Amino acid sequence: MPNFRVKKLKEPKFPFEKDGVKFIDIAKGRVVDLLLVEAGGERFFITIKPSKELFVIKGEKLTRPAKVGLLQKALEIYRDEFCDELVSNSINFKKNSLTKNSEIIKDEISALNELKNHDKVAIEIGFGSGRHLLFQAGEKKDVFHLGIEIYKPGVEQVAKQALKSEISNLCLVNTDARNFLNLVQSNSVDTIYLHFPVPWDDAPHRRVISTEFMSEVQRVLKNGGTFELRSDSRAYVDFSMLKFLDMDFVNLEVFKNRDIEVSSKYEDRWKKQEKDIYDIIVKNYKISEPLNDRDSKFSFSKLNPERVYKNFRRERLKFDDFFLNFEEVYKFSSKNVLLKLSFGDFDVAQNCFILISDNETKYFINEPLKTIKNQKAHKKIGELLLQW
């Protein structure tokens, strides 16, 4: 994460704009302040945290843009314009950093809409270096490829490679695939790849593959569509096979040390170490029911921002199949209040900000995905905020 440390700060006069970067306002927190930034058509926060006699300045994790060059540029401008006595600097903004809008990197909603425009669709979960994803997209021009990756810097690196190779039948999303698949239309995907997922041998509950996940995989696959797992972990493969055998209307193929057209850099390393590599291909023969309508908007009743600010308390609440965690509260100079919270599925948490003003209350910068558990959590959040 790009960052720097300084001894002194100067208060900006808002709004401040330079070289396409706009500093809008600061949300004051109890420990950390959030500087609201707009650049390249995106909004995100920069965190300002006192640390002994210094200030640590870096990008805020939840809103960090996938085009990390935007964050680097904003940090550089803030450093040069409003900071004195630089102690350390870890910003490496380069002219070739991805800062302009790219059709390749999309948010979740845009990606879901894009999938509806294509007859043939392949999804790769956790594409890493992108070697397999880019090869498939380059070879199969008639198939639209969607890459899902939770590691933001990896998204930018693969996007730059795709642009350089002029690959257009591709988009990338920085999100958790387990949430994203819940919103993909039924019977719409030809192939799903999951190559070399983190095995989590010491914490199996954190594995991507689960009964619930495979139920969603089967729902989104077409009749005749395939799910392909590739792994060097025998424990992960054995665990996954038990999940696959519990499924109906599927055919399984298992391979050991199968050569495929392209291999990842990690796979090359493991082959040199003579490690075994396993493939399981799950072919679906089930036609699933259409996805229930989840287009309704998340909305809140009108709230009093000052009252919410005064009554805020850190609190974690557990319910039957979802949770809520009120983490922090901030206040803008406009007196608008910002809440930071996480909620939803126990294993796949949604992290968001809620902005509360005199006129409206809404999710800010990133809206949560409309999964069933997120909808339940949202309803409970609204009820609790009214009590405050």
Image (cartoon, helix red, strand yellow):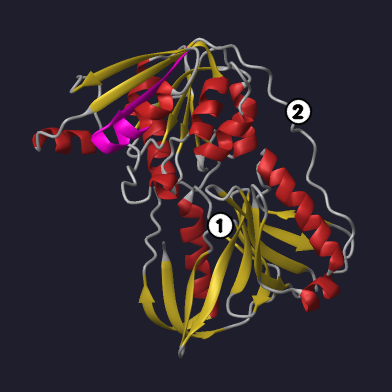
Residue 112 on the magenta segment:
no
Q: Secondary structure at mark 2?
A: loop
First-in-chain label (2 vs 1)? 1
Q: Is residue 271 above or below residue 6?
A: above
> For the point 47% across and 15% down, which residue is it?
143
| Residue 232 among magenta residues | yes
Looking at the image, which residue is at 36% across and 35% down?
161
Q: How many marks?
A: 2
Q: Which residues are magenta?
A: 225-239
Disc 2 or disc 1, which is closer to the eye? Answer: 2
Q: Which residue is mark 1?
A: 62
Tell me if residue 387 can be seen: yes
Amino acid at pointer 1: Leu
Quick check: can you spot residue 131? Answer: no
- Location of the N terminus by quadrant is bottom left
Q: Is residue 305 left or right of residue 184?
A: right
Q: Can you give x and y, in whole percent of width and height, for residue 247 in the image?
A: 48, 21
